[in-house]
Amino acid sequence: MAEQFYPYTGATNPTAYEYWNECTDPDYLLEKLMWDIAPIDGKMVLDVGAGSGFQAVRYASKAFRIFAAEPDPRMLRQIYLRLAKEDVGNVSVLAVSAEEITLPTDSIDVAYARFAYFYGTDDCLPGLSEIQRVLKPGGHFFVIDNNPDRGQFGKLARQAHPEIYTPTYVDERTDFYREHGFERFEVDTLIRAPDRQVLGEILKLDFADNYRKVLCSIEGTELSYSLSVYHFKE
Ligand SMILES: C[S@@+](CC[C@H](N)C(=O)[O-])C[C@H]1O[C@@H](n2cnc3c(N)ncnc32)[C@H](O)[C@@H]1O
């Protein structure tokens, strides 16, 4: 396991995690923002903390090659199961953490870490220099994080995890990333479930045993969800 290893509940609940990926950002606003800044068509792409490989496989049709870097064996299993089902030949799995990417220097055009490892504290500096090592000159790196200051999901996440989402969470991350050369963007998107049973499954990932209470506080099958996107250009 990686030195800085942050486990995620999706590793032990693949069904809920798949729903989460299918229902989050249904209009693809996040990737529109990222690929407008840094088009990935025909490019070498790195997904850091790739989870079950949902995004890596999704973006594979555009990229020349995608490396899905993931240290958790339970997630690696999910990636391999996905790759066995999908017809993609340009996704390569790296069983590594962000601090030790087994790729050559200057080999990646666009890297991204979606809710993974780069939580905007000094702990992620070894990983940050490792990503900068593998980025080509002019390469791009995106870090995607929850924004607890906006949207229904952020508000609920802050209520459930006040020790993580402190009142200054976003300001502190913004300052941290600015100091390291990143620019901040916001994406106001949605979680849109097909029904309340699926929404409940999704909520289990972040709210565990409290998910029923959280579900009762939401009307219908949709909730607003805001993201902070930090962008670095090498
Ligand atoms: C919240 S999940 C997000 C997964 C995926 N990016 C997504 O958007 O669905 C965080 C992922 O980061 C992985 N992770 C934990 N520690 C890591 C590290 N040191 N380097 C890279 N990834 C790490 C976890 O195993 C998990 O798969």
Image: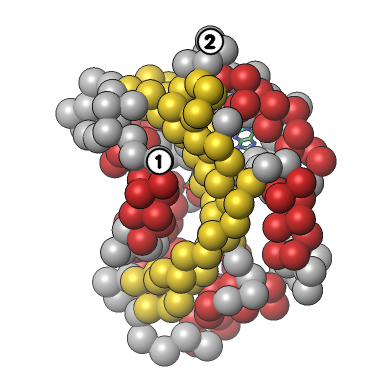
Q: Is residue 200 visible?
A: no
Q: Earlier in the sequence, mark 1 or mark 2?
A: 1
Write the residue at 47% across / 16% down: 107
Q: Position of residue 98 (x, y in %)?
A: 63, 28
Rendered image: mark on residue 152: none
Left or right position of 52 against 101:
left
Camera-side residue: 34 or 74? 34
Q: Quadrant of the C terminus?
A: top right
Q: Is residue 232 above or below residue 103?
A: below
Camera-side residue: 58 or 206? 58
Which amino acid lies under the numbered mark 2 shown in the image of this protein?
A: Pro
Cα–Cα span, label 1 and label 2: 21 Å
Write the residue at 55% across / 37% down: 233
Q: Is residue 133 above or below residue 173?
A: above
Q: Secondary structure at mark 1?
A: loop
Q: Secondary structure at mark 2?
A: loop
Disc 1 under 8 Å from ligand 1? The reply is no
Q: Quadrant of the N terminus?
A: top right
Between disc 1 and disc 2, the foreground one is 1
Name the residue tied to disc 2.
Answer: 104
> Which of the 4 image quarters holds residue 32?
bottom left
Q: Position of residue 24 (x, y in %)?
A: 39, 62
Name the residue tied to disc 1.
Answer: 38
Residue extending furthest toward the top: 104
